[in-house]
Structure formats: structure tokens, C-alpha cells
Image: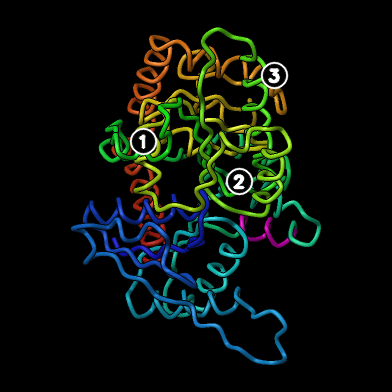
């Protein structure tokens, strides 16, 4: 199949999944065309299938009349252009805003010649935050309902979409995925010494540092752990590694200083995925105190690397992290219980190993590429055949 994929190229779950889906499809022999304003961050991971992966940049006109360049229209034009030139069989867009509307426009432009099916995958804040804003809700609903197929990355997100948009369209749940060979525990002692030069236990957090991620709670958990350990005969040494960047970073750094734990926190900034994998391979615990997560891809990557997870019981996280089996789930803001659980996990080597092993087992059993990618292939084939049959019908 010749498949067009549009996703945001920036650091974030929808872009990561869109890029990795394209790479995995290319490995299976499909021809993949990415259409966006910049190449997705993980496109360099294409490896030997790189000859089947193509990138087409969306050109933006700079004109004084446009205070904000009309990206939706430019993307629609580029989708039409690529679909025509490359004879795409299907367009798959990730994140509803504005991609589903641009794909709809491209499909309508192409209609006099042929029908081009559109798949929209919903990822989270396009539904739970941005899409439900009054200025976007009607157009988001329209883009969803005009798609030929809609998928969501969790049951939670599917249900939230129906509730928010009151749409009657079918939404198929296809979970996010990991390459279990790529994500596995292979500790690099040099990386561990770099992150924890005094042999500390490593608590890792990875996110975009947006308010919804509640990164300040990571700092508060560490401070609470320090408070609980005060006076202990064998005080646990722990280091919090904050991986990522975003609007909440400065406030989190100030909070660490104010709570007296700045010397135990490392802000390492945005990192390529290969580096994040190295961090996961030496981490002792992943901390994910988000206010909302539609799936929890970072938690899944940690589980594949045998890292126990402490997270909030929100959104789609309980569909990935089994409470008590591969980690522990708590209510939003419950830093006291998170801190106690973190101390227990970090102090008990046998428990940490049990949680890690179970996490990898869950990841392999439910979320690997060989289980998830065929679901997308079957969806594509069904849509293409359906519209081919309709076209051939007298």
C-alpha cells in the first residue's frame, strides 16, 4: 500500500506514534509518505527501510495580510498534491486538529478523479483539551465525523470523544505500541554514572513539561521522600532525572530550590529517543503524576525496559499499568502516598525486580508491534477494498 501520514513533528505522543507507525509499516513493505511542516523527530530510526519512507514539506506563504499563516489550507493543498503525484491509497492523520479537516479538504479536491479514504487517529488533548474549546469543538466534530475511519489510542479516549462531541461515528480502539527489541533493559554503566555519580537510585520523569503533566509533583514527591527518610539509619540516596522541556520547567527548578532538593534533581532537557531508551535502561523507577494521560506511552516504554511505574489513576493509564502488578497508581496530587510507595520500591530490590519483570511481560503480551501494526493494516485494507467495490459497482 501507498500511505500518506500526517502528524506533528514535535516532541509529543501523537508525533511519536505517527512516525513509528510509518517506520513499522515501511518495514512491512509499504510505501510511506510523511506530509508535515518538518520531518517527524523519529524518522531517522527508519534504518534499512529508509528507501520506502519519503517526506514532503508543507510550504507556508509569508504574506503581510496573514497574521497567522493558514496552515490548514496549505496542508490540504500538499496532501492533494502528494496524493495525486504518488497515487496514495489512503491518508492517515494523527491528532484531529487541524489534520482531519485538511485531509477532508484534500479528499474533496480529489473526488472528481477518485476517492481517497481518510483515517483519523485521536491521541488525547485534541479531544480532552483543545478540541473541546468552544472555538474548535464544531470543526473538530466535523473532521471526526467526515473521516472514513476513526481510531483512538485507549478505551478512555474513545468514550471521552463520544461524551464530548456527542458523535455517533464508530471509533475503533487501537492501542499505542512498542518495539520490544528496541525497548529492553540493557544497562550502560557509563550512563548510570553520568546520571547518578554517587550511586543514587534513579527516579526518571519524561514529558513535555506542560501544566497537564504536573511536573511539580515530581519535585514534591522527592522532597517528601527526603522528609520521610530524615533520621533514618540508612538513608536512601535518590536522584530525580527530569527529561524534557516546556513552560513549567523554570517553576519546577524554583520549586526544587525552595524545597531544598535542588542538589538531587537533574534537568537534562529534551533528548533523542535513543538517549531516553538509555535512561530507561538504568532507571529504578518512572514517576508519572499527570493530571491526564490518554494512554501513557512513556509508562509503556518504561515497562518494556523493566522499570516499575508510579503514576496517577487517570485516563488510559489503568489500561496500561496494572496497579500492584507492574507499578502503583494513585489519585492526582497524592504526593504523600507516591513518596511512600517510591521509597518501598527503591529499598526492596526483590520487589523492584518483580515489578519490572511483570511490566515487561504485560508490554510484550499486549502492546508490541507484531500485535498492533496488523490492526492498522487490516483497517487500511478494509477501507481501500470498500471504496474500490463502491467505485466498481454499476
Q: Residue placed farthest to the right in the image?
A: 134
Residue 311 x %, y %: 58, 27
Sequence-wise first label, 2 or 3: 2
Q: Quadrant of the C terminus?
A: bottom left
In the picture of the structure, the residue carrying the numbered disc 3 is: 336
Q: Residue at x 40, y 44 (%)?
A: 276
Q: Which residues are magenta?
A: 138-145
Q: Is residue 394 visible?
A: no
In the picture, the disc for residue 161 is none
Q: Quadrant of the N terminus?
A: bottom left
Q: Residue furthest left?
A: 48
On residue 193, the disc is 1
SS at badge 3: helix
Tell me how far mark 1 sits from mark 3, CA to CA. Answer: 29 Å
Q: Is residue 158 left or right of residue 193?
A: right
Q: Going 37% across and 51% down the picture, which residue do you hit?
A: 21
Say which quarter of the image contains residue 50.
bottom left
Q: Which mark is residue 124?
A: 2
Q: Residues within 10 Å of mark 1 (few under 14, many from 20)?
A: few
What's the distance in space between the residues labelled 1 and 2, CA to CA?
A: 36 Å
For the residue pair 195 and 2, the one nearer the viewer reads as 195
Q: Who comes first in sequence, dot 1 or dot 3?
A: 1
State yes or no: residue 13 in magenta. Answer: no
Q: Is residue 164 left or right of residue 237?
A: right
Answer with the quarter of the image where residue 18 lies.
Answer: bottom left
Amino acid at each position: 500500500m501507498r500511505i500518506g501520514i500526517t502528524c506533528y513533528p514535535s516532541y509529543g505522543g501523537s508525533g511519536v506514534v505517527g512516525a513509528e507507525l510509518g517506520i513499522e509499516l515501511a518495514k512491512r513493505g509499504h510505501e510511506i509518505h510523511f506530509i508535515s511542516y518538518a520531518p517527524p523527530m523519529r524518522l531517522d530510526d527508519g534504518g534499512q527501510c529508509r528507501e520506502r519512507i519519503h517526506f514532503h514539506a508543507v510550504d507556508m506563504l509569508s504574506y503581510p495580510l496573514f497574521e497567522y499563516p493558514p496552515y490548514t489550507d496549505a496542508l490540504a493543498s500538499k496532501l492533494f498534491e502528494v496524493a495525486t503525484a504518488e497515487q496514495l491509497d489512503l491518508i492517515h492523520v494523527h491528532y484531529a486538529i487541524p489534520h482531519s479537516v485538511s485531509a477532508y479538504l484534500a479528499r474533496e479536491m480529489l473526488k472528481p478523479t477518485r476517492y481517497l479514504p481518510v483515517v483519523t487517529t485521536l491521541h488525547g488533548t485534541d479531544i480532552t483539551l483543545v478540541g473541546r474549546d468552544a472555538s474548535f469543538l464544531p470543526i473538530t466534530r466535523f473532521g471526526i465525523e467526515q473521516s472514513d475511519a476513526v481510531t483512538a489510542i485507549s478505551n478512555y479516549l474513545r468514550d471521552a470523544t463520544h461524551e464530548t462531541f456527542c458523535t455517533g461515528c464508530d471509533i475503533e480502539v487501537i492501542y499505542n505500541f512498542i518495539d520490544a527489541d528496541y525497548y529492553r533493559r540493557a544497562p550502560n554503566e557509563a550512563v548510570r554514572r553520568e546520571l547518578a555519580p554517587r550511586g543514587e537510585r534513579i527516579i526518571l520523569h519524561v514529558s513535555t513539561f506542560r501544566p497537564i503533566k504536573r511536573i511539580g509533583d515530581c519535585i514534591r514527591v522527592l522532597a517528601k521522600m527526603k522528609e520521610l527518610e530524615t533520621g533514618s539509619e540508612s538513608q536512601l540516596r535518590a536522584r530525580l532525572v527530569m527529561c524534557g522541556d516546556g513552560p513549567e520547567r523554570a517553576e519546577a527548578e524554583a520549586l526544587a530550590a525552595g524545597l531544598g532538593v535542588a542538589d538531587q534533581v537533574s534537568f537534562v532537557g529534551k533528548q533523542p529517543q535513543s538517549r531516553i531508551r538509555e535512561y530507561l535502561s538504568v532507571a529504578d523507577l518512572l514517576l508519572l503524576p499527570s493530571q491526564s494521560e490518554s494512554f501513557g506511552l512513556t509508562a509503556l516504554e518504561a515497562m518494556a525496559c523493566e522499570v516499575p511505574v508510579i503514576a496517577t489513576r487517570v485516563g488510559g493509564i489503568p489500561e496500561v499499568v496494572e496497579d500492584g502488578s507492574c507499578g502503583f497508581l494513585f489519585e492526582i496530587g497524592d504526593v504523600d502516598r507516591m513518596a511512600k510507595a517510591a521509597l518501598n520500591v527503591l529499598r526492596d530490590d526483590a520487589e523492584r525486580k518483580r515489578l519490572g519483570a511483570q511490566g515487561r511481560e504485560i508490554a510484550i503480551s499486549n502492546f508490541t508491534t507484531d500485535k498492533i501494526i496488523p490492526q492498522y493494516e487490516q483497517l487500511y485494507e478494509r477501507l481501500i477494498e470498500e471504496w474500490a467495490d463502491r467505485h466498481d459497482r454499476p
